[in-house]
Amino acid sequence: MGFTLTGSTLSGPGFTAKMPSGWTLAAENGVDTNDGVIENGSRNTLAYFASDPSSATTRCHNAAENYRAKLGGTVVDLPAVPWGNDTAVVKELETKYSTGEAIGLDIYCVDRPGNASAVIFSIAAPEHQETNKAAAEGLLASWVWT
């Protein structure tokens, strides 16, 4: 499906939010299994997956551990952040692709009705990781479930 953008309003399956300044819809938006992808420059992305049949805690743990098992690195629990009127579980992993390129991965997961969860992956070069996290957390704070 993918995101749509009208002015500065980002819309997707079951929500609206404010698009972070300087971000655009990515070519990967709605492709394969994602429910939306935005980007700010090369390889700095936020990818949304609307529904997973597990709790936010389980979803974030499994996602972080799957990446760690494939790419190495150490998973760190970060403080919870607001996601709309809810609270997101946050995990962080600094690692490298198989090509050796370093990446920072922050995973935000929130519980949804029906024993499900939603997730946003923030993926960035290490020098852009803090900027990506700020954009992700601003997006989540503006989030309204519809």
Image (cartoon, helix red, strand yellow):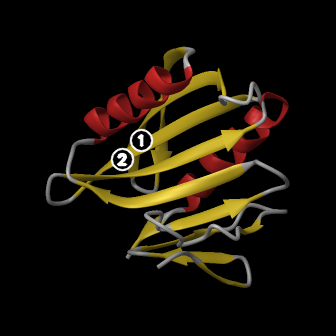
Q: Is residue 78 visible?
A: no
Amino acid beneath label 1: Ala
Residue 41 visible (yes or no): yes
Q: How far apart are the alpha carbons under marks 2 and 1?
A: 5 Å
Quadrant in which the C terminus appears:
bottom left
- The outermost residue toward the bottom is 6
Which percent across, then down, holds residue 91?
48, 28
Give the vertical position of 15 relative to 74 (above or below). below
144 vs 96: above or below? below
Residue visible at 41% across and 75% down in the picture: 13
Viewer-nearest residue: 126 or 10: 126
- Residue 15's disc number: none
- Residue appearing at x 64%, y 22% in the figure: 95
Residue corresponding to mark 2 = 110
The answer to whether 82 is drawn above or below residue 15 in the figure is: above
The quarter of the picture where residue 29 lies is bottom right
Q: Disc 1 on helix, strand or loop?
A: strand
The three-letter code of the residue at mark 2 reads Val
Q: Residues within 10 Å of mark 2 (few under 14, many from 20)?
A: many
- Seen in the picture, residue 99 relative to 85 is either above or below; the reply is above
- Foreground residue, 64 or 111? 64
Q: What residue do we see at 61% from left, 33% from top?
A: 105
Residue at far left of view? 114
Closest to the observer, 24 or 98 = 98
| Residue that mark 1 sits on | 88
* Residue 51 located left or right of residue 105: left
Q: Are marks 2 and 1 in contact (CB under 8 Å)?
A: yes
